[in-house]
Amino acid sequence: MNRRTAFKTLALATGTLITLPPWMLSCGITDKTTHLSSFSPEQQHTLASVADTIIPAGNAIGALSVGVDKYLQKIFDDCYEKDVCDNIRNKLDTLESHTETSNGTRFSNASQKIREQALLDFLISEDTKEIAALIKTETIRGFSTSREVMVDYHGYKVAPGHFYGSVKVNS
Protein backbone atom coordinates (compact mmCIF):
# COMPACT_ATOMS: atom_id res chain seq x y z
CA MET A 1 0.00 0.00 0.00
CA ASN A 2 1.24 3.46 -0.86
CA ARG A 3 1.42 5.35 2.44
CA ARG A 4 1.47 8.81 0.88
CA THR A 5 -1.73 8.22 -1.08
CA ALA A 6 -3.42 6.74 1.98
CA PHE A 7 -2.31 9.69 4.12
CA LYS A 8 -3.58 12.22 1.53
CA THR A 9 -6.93 10.45 1.33
CA LEU A 10 -7.21 10.28 5.11
CA ALA A 11 -6.32 13.98 5.47
CA LEU A 12 -8.89 14.96 2.83
CA ALA A 13 -11.61 12.87 4.46
CA THR A 14 -10.80 14.29 7.91
CA GLY A 15 -10.86 17.86 6.62
CA THR A 16 -14.18 17.25 4.92
CA LEU A 17 -15.72 15.74 8.05
CA ILE A 18 -14.46 18.62 10.21
CA THR A 19 -16.03 21.28 7.96
CA LEU A 20 -19.30 19.42 7.37
CA PRO A 21 -21.21 20.35 10.59
CA PRO A 22 -20.70 24.14 10.33
CA TRP A 23 -21.51 23.99 6.65
CA MET A 24 -24.77 22.15 7.33
CA LEU A 25 -25.73 24.61 10.08
CA SER A 26 -25.35 27.51 7.67
CA CYS A 27 -27.86 25.90 5.27
CA GLY A 28 -31.00 26.66 7.23
CA ILE A 29 -34.60 26.97 6.13
CA THR A 30 -34.35 30.75 6.37
CA ASP A 31 -31.87 30.74 3.49
CA LYS A 32 -34.54 29.34 1.20
CA THR A 33 -37.09 31.98 2.15
CA THR A 34 -34.71 34.86 1.52
CA HIS A 35 -34.65 36.17 -2.01
CA LEU A 36 -32.05 38.61 -3.27
CA SER A 37 -34.50 41.09 -4.69
CA SER A 38 -34.00 44.01 -7.01
CA PHE A 39 -36.46 45.95 -4.85
CA SER A 40 -35.06 48.28 -2.22
CA PRO A 41 -35.96 47.54 1.43
CA GLU A 42 -38.47 50.41 1.39
CA GLN A 43 -40.08 49.08 -1.78
CA GLN A 44 -40.19 45.58 -0.28
CA HIS A 45 -41.97 47.00 2.75
CA THR A 46 -44.39 48.90 0.51
CA LEU A 47 -45.08 45.78 -1.56
CA ALA A 48 -45.73 43.82 1.64
CA SER A 49 -48.11 46.57 2.80
CA VAL A 50 -49.94 46.45 -0.53
CA ALA A 51 -50.35 42.67 -0.24
CA ASP A 52 -51.54 43.07 3.36
CA THR A 53 -54.04 45.71 2.26
CA ILE A 54 -55.45 43.54 -0.51
CA ILE A 55 -55.72 40.41 1.68
CA PRO A 56 -55.54 41.41 5.36
CA ALA A 57 -55.07 38.82 8.08
CA GLY A 58 -58.22 39.41 10.13
CA ASN A 59 -59.37 36.26 11.95
CA ALA A 60 -57.98 33.90 9.32
CA ILE A 61 -54.69 33.80 7.47
CA GLY A 62 -53.64 36.79 5.42
CA ALA A 63 -51.31 37.49 2.54
CA LEU A 64 -48.26 38.12 4.72
CA SER A 65 -48.68 34.97 6.79
CA VAL A 66 -48.47 32.76 3.69
CA GLY A 67 -45.54 34.69 2.20
CA VAL A 68 -47.24 36.51 -0.67
CA ASP A 69 -44.86 39.46 -0.28
CA LYS A 70 -41.86 37.20 -0.98
CA TYR A 71 -43.77 35.57 -3.83
CA LEU A 72 -44.43 38.96 -5.42
CA GLN A 73 -40.79 39.99 -5.21
CA LYS A 74 -39.64 36.71 -6.72
CA ILE A 75 -42.20 36.59 -9.51
CA PHE A 76 -41.61 40.20 -10.52
CA ASP A 77 -37.83 39.72 -10.51
CA ASP A 78 -37.78 36.36 -12.28
CA CYS A 79 -40.81 36.28 -14.57
CA TYR A 80 -41.36 39.82 -15.78
CA GLU A 81 -39.24 41.95 -18.07
CA LYS A 82 -36.89 44.56 -16.68
CA ASP A 83 -38.95 47.52 -17.88
CA VAL A 84 -42.06 46.14 -16.15
CA CYS A 85 -40.08 45.67 -12.92
CA ASP A 86 -38.71 49.20 -13.19
CA ASN A 87 -42.22 50.50 -13.73
CA ILE A 88 -43.46 48.58 -10.65
CA ARG A 89 -40.65 50.01 -8.54
CA ASN A 90 -41.41 53.54 -9.75
CA LYS A 91 -45.13 53.14 -9.07
CA LEU A 92 -44.44 51.79 -5.56
CA ASP A 93 -42.37 54.91 -4.88
CA THR A 94 -45.20 57.00 -6.34
CA LEU A 95 -47.70 55.27 -4.06
CA GLU A 96 -45.54 56.00 -1.01
CA SER A 97 -45.06 59.65 -1.91
CA HIS A 98 -48.72 60.16 -2.88
CA THR A 99 -49.93 58.70 0.41
CA GLU A 100 -47.42 60.78 2.34
CA THR A 101 -48.44 64.04 0.68
CA SER A 102 -52.18 63.42 0.91
CA ASN A 103 -52.36 61.91 4.41
CA GLY A 104 -49.14 62.95 6.10
CA THR A 105 -48.04 59.36 6.67
CA ARG A 106 -46.20 56.83 4.55
CA PHE A 107 -48.22 54.05 2.92
CA SER A 108 -46.37 51.39 4.90
CA ASN A 109 -47.22 53.05 8.22
CA ALA A 110 -50.78 54.13 7.37
CA SER A 111 -53.94 52.58 8.76
CA GLN A 112 -55.88 49.97 6.82
CA LYS A 113 -58.54 52.48 5.78
CA ILE A 114 -55.99 54.98 4.42
CA ARG A 115 -54.14 52.22 2.56
CA GLU A 116 -57.39 50.95 1.02
CA GLN A 117 -58.28 54.45 -0.18
CA ALA A 118 -54.77 54.96 -1.59
CA LEU A 119 -54.98 51.66 -3.48
CA LEU A 120 -58.42 52.55 -4.84
CA ASP A 121 -57.00 55.86 -6.07
CA PHE A 122 -54.09 53.91 -7.51
CA LEU A 123 -56.48 51.58 -9.39
CA ILE A 124 -58.53 54.49 -10.76
CA SER A 125 -55.62 56.64 -11.92
CA GLU A 126 -54.92 56.22 -15.63
CA ASP A 127 -51.11 56.04 -15.41
CA THR A 128 -51.01 53.55 -12.51
CA LYS A 129 -54.07 51.43 -13.30
CA GLU A 130 -52.22 48.74 -15.23
CA ILE A 131 -49.49 48.19 -12.62
CA ALA A 132 -52.00 48.26 -9.76
CA ALA A 133 -54.11 45.63 -11.49
CA LEU A 134 -51.01 43.49 -12.07
CA ILE A 135 -49.99 43.67 -8.41
CA LYS A 136 -53.55 42.88 -7.33
CA THR A 137 -53.83 39.90 -9.68
CA GLU A 138 -50.49 38.44 -8.64
CA THR A 139 -51.32 38.96 -4.96
CA ILE A 140 -54.54 37.01 -5.31
CA ARG A 141 -52.80 34.30 -7.34
CA GLY A 142 -50.01 34.00 -4.80
CA PHE A 143 -52.48 33.73 -1.92
CA SER A 144 -54.86 31.27 -3.58
CA THR A 145 -52.04 28.95 -4.69
CA SER A 146 -50.16 28.98 -1.39
CA ARG A 147 -49.76 25.67 0.40
CA GLU A 148 -51.75 26.75 3.46
CA VAL A 149 -54.78 27.82 1.44
CA MET A 150 -54.67 24.81 -0.87
CA VAL A 151 -54.34 22.26 1.95
CA ASP A 152 -56.44 23.85 4.69
CA TYR A 153 -59.27 25.39 2.67
CA HIS A 154 -59.45 23.51 -0.62
CA GLY A 155 -58.66 20.03 0.71
CA TYR A 156 -55.72 19.57 -1.64
CA LYS A 157 -53.53 16.60 -0.76
CA VAL A 158 -49.87 17.19 -1.50
CA ALA A 159 -49.11 13.47 -1.76
CA PRO A 160 -52.37 11.53 -1.60
CA GLY A 161 -50.77 8.09 -1.30
CA HIS A 162 -53.59 6.14 -2.87
CA PHE A 163 -54.18 5.34 -6.49
CA TYR A 164 -56.71 2.88 -7.81
CA GLY A 165 -55.29 2.09 -11.22
CA SER A 166 -57.17 -1.09 -11.98
CA VAL A 167 -60.88 -0.48 -12.13
CA LYS A 168 -63.35 -2.93 -13.63
CA VAL A 169 -65.10 -1.51 -16.66
CA ASN A 170 -68.52 -2.92 -17.41
CA SER A 171 -69.21 -2.94 -21.13
Image: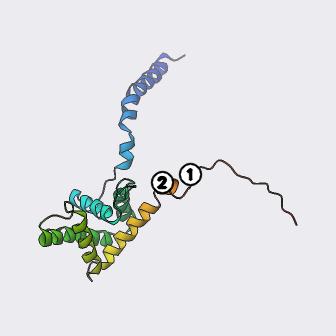
Dot 1 or dot 2, earlier in sequence:
2
Which residue occupies 17% across, 70% down? 99
* Residue 28 seen in this snapshot: yes
41 lies left or right of 80: left
Secondary structure under the numbered disc 2 in the rendered image? helix
Does 39 sit above or below residue 126? above
Which residue occupies 23% across, 72% down? 118
Residue 120 position, x and y percent, is 28, 75
Callout 1 crowding tier (Cα within 10 Å): few <14, some 14–19, many ≥20 = few
Callout 2 crowding tier (Cα within 10 Å): few <14, some 14–19, many ≥20 = some
* Residue 8 image label: none
* Residue 38 seen in this snapshot: no
Does 160 sit above or below residue 14? below
Does 64 sit above or below residue 171? above
Question: Hey, which quadrant is residue 166 in on the image?
Answer: bottom right
Does 135 sit above or below residue 143? below
Which residue occupies 27% across, 61% down? 49
Disc 1 designates what residue?
158
Amino acid bearing label 1:
Val
Q: Are marks 1 and 2 in contact (CB under 8 Å)?
A: yes
101 lies left or right of 75: left
* Residue 147 image label: 2
Q: Quadrant of the N terminus?
A: top right
